[in-house]
Image: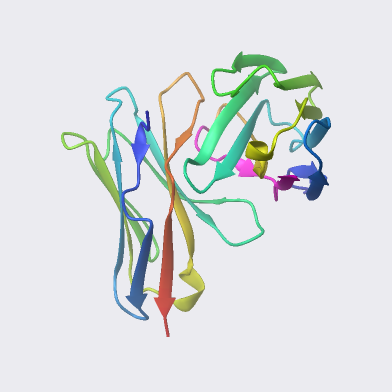
Amino acid sequence: DAGVIQSPRHEVTEMGQEVTLRCKPISGHNSLFWYRQTMMRGLELLIYFNNNVPIDDSGMPEDRFSAKMPNASFSTLKIQPSEPRDSAVYFCASSFVRHPGELFFGEGSRLTVL
Amino acid sequence: DQQVKQNSPSLSVQEGRISILNCDYTNSMFDYFLWYKKYPAEGPTFLISISSIKDKNEDGRFTVFLNKSAKHLSLHIVPSQPGDSAVYFCAASTSGTYKYIFGTGTRLKVLA
């Protein structure tokens, strides 16, 4: 059974460019989460979806960040325009809501903004 | 404000000894707690969880203790093995929200 798939694994871009991170959750899971890992804040929840609907986006740092989930098998996190302080590892995770607690994480997308 | 806190950024333990990782939380509405383990260049993986109706949950070498009055939980690893060297995150959630708040992590190093 395939796990959560994220792409790209690594992204290096210049300040001001648009960045799109992609996530394919585990089939059958109905919740999807975007986290950002930094040294200072650890794993920071950005946004989560339940049945493709955004439930809580209070962690999205600024209007430059947006996330979509057009269907149950795909989500994107977009940063436009990107800034050097956005450099971090971004994780996508999914779960099946009847079993809370077992978030399944992807391997992450490491973003570097120069 | 950090609702879930792991005040020790790192911990070193000798192989075979006990590792104790601590976590504090501030939100009394949290009723489900989890520990995740993360190796470099990999995503976090689920380790063990505990519901607020319990004060202890054990799985092999891993035991999680919950002290609700102190808003504190801890993860005990006995005996510690070099393969346990990783970053450990605690997380908390409230029933019905499915919103998992993670701490900043503790890097455990088990010395052979």
Residue at 38 percent of width and 66 percent of height: B61
> Is B44 colored magenta in this rendering?
no
Residue B41, by quadrant, is: bottom right
User: Please, is residue B24 above or below residue B46 in the view?
Assistant: above
Residue A28, by quadrant, is: top right
Residue B34, by quadrant, is: top left
Residue at 51 percent of width and 49 percent of height: A39
Image coordinates for residue A96, horizontal then vertical, percent: 62, 31
User: Please, is residue A67 above or below residue B53 in the view?
Assistant: above
Q: Is residue B79 visible?
A: no
Image quadrant in which the N terminus of chain B is located? top left
Image coordinates for residue B65, horizontal then vertical, percent: 26, 49
Image coordinates for residue B19, horizontal then vertical, percent: 32, 67
Image quadrant in which the C terminus of chain B is located? bottom left
User: In the figure, is residue B40 to the left or right of A100?
Assistant: right
Image coordinates for residue B33, horizontal then vertical, percent: 38, 38
> Is A104 colored magenta in this rendering?
yes
Residue at 78 percent of width and 28 percent of height: A75
User: Depth check: B43 or B94 in front?
Assistant: B43
User: Depth check: B15 or B31 in front?
Assistant: B15
Give the magenta-colored segment's residue range. A100-114
User: Please, is residue B25 above or below residue B17 in the view?
Assistant: above
Q: Is residue B48 visible?
A: yes
User: In the figure, is residue B38 to the left or right of B77?
Assistant: right
Q: Quick one: which residue is furthest to the bottom in this view?
A: B112
User: In the figure, is residue A62 to the left or right of B6?
Assistant: right
Residue at 35 percent of width and 72 percent of height: B12
